[in-house]
Amino acid sequence: MLFPFFANAQTTTSSPYSIFGIGELKYGGFTQHHGAGGTSIALRDQNNFSFSNPASYSNIKFTVYNAGAGLNFGKIADQKTESRTSSGNFSHFAMAFPLSTKKSMGFSFGVNQYSDVGYEIKNTVNTDTPSYFNLYNGSGGINCLYVGYGVELVKNLSLGANLNINFGNIQSRKYRVYPNSDQVYSFSDETFYAYRGLDFDLGVQYYMQAGKKNENKISHTLGLVFRNNSKLYGDGYRYAETFYGRSFDFGNITAIDTLIFEDFKKDTVNKPLGIAIGYTLSKGDKWTLSLEAEQILFSSIENRVTSSAFEDNTRFSAGFSFIPSPNYGERGSFFKHVRYSIGGRYEDLYYDFGSYTFREFGISFGLGLPVVKSVRLEEEKVPVVSRVNISAEYVKRGTNTNDFIQEDYFKIGLGLNLNDKWFTKRKYR
């Protein structure tokens, strides 16, 4: 068994598998993308953009703000026990605006989560020598601050690039407590790293429309993203001590002796290369079908938790969005202008357990509630659509057989997509 302390273990926070590598990966995109299976690589929308593919910045016509947060409710179970979890997080803030009204080019910046670490694993070991409890916990993750630029290089072909500034802290602790012995001291071992590093994304989108230009014509978009491999550099420390304590109530322990105290300088963690490809088929703003595949080459990364190598992380996603009436000047029910989304994804995760492939399945739904106003663009009044976005996703990860842990999550996302027009030249007559 590659991960023996999962046996007879109880977990009480977000995901025990975030103990691996730099934690649980947060797939890209905004709340509205999560409602459609997480697809975002090949989406082009003048009212929105996707930091997952910087080529999309070339198509925006308005200043766009996008922010989001999420709540997770889950059940974690093995063959003997189960526990309930809940957590919340800020997921992203981003802004984009066009740089020219004559040329298709745009600029974007923002911050988002790349990975999340949050676990607490308890188990009991009964032996002839004094029995003891183990507790493993960790917290933190890696965030990404980005700046990006996208431009239509030639007709229907857009290129873009993001410069990513990665930063974050990862803290891990191990405690061993002997509850029934006065002869053996309990001990704790803690490590902390503050990481930072740079990398970049390159994105391409090729757009085709059937027939003459018309908002209701069928269009095709192909998107491709390359994310370079890079290093995260970390400074930190390791601190270990013995203490008196017969429980996990660590607010009531008495330290005895320091076993280890050392500073770490220039620790490095590799952030692997990633490639993603996407395709969308759409009819104006009426409906959009999206397909997407992504591979992150974790097989080139060292596993510091077990002796096994990581596997490549592979994801397949599909999504469909539909607006009954995208004519926002048309009177009628509010719900005719709501965007309805559904999607699904399948993922082979990078955790390695020998012959077992660790999989994740998700099905999602989304609503985009519109707020519409009109602005003048190139001597024409056009609707500017902002939305309050809601996503809901059910996720199943892993299995509860062979001493592994199965996770079932219900994730709720709330996002705000605001559009406005900046730098408008006023005309006086």
Image (cartoon, grey):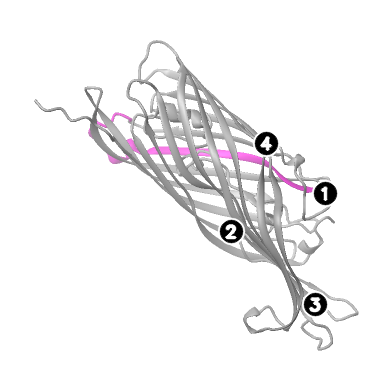
Single out the residue that lies furthest toward the left.
Answer: 429
Magenta stretch encompasses residue 335: yes
Q: Nearer the viewer, mark 4 or mark 2?
A: 4
Q: Nearer the viewer, mark 1 or mark 2?
A: 1
Residue at image mark 1: 308
Q: Is residue 168 visible?
A: yes
Residue type indicated by callout 2: Gly
Which mark sits nearer the N-terminus, 3 or 4?
3
Q: CA distance from mark 4 to mark 1?
A: 20 Å
Which mark sits nearer the N-terminus, 1 or 2?
2
Where residue 111 sits: x, y (%)?
49, 46
Residue at image mark 4: 273
Where residue 114 sits: x, y (%)?
58, 47
Q: Are marks 4 and 1 in contact (CB under 8 Å)?
A: no
Single out the residue that lies furthest toward the bottom.
Answer: 182
Q: CA distance from mark 1 to mark 3?
A: 27 Å
Residue at image mark 3: 132
Q: Quadrant of the N terminus?
A: bottom right
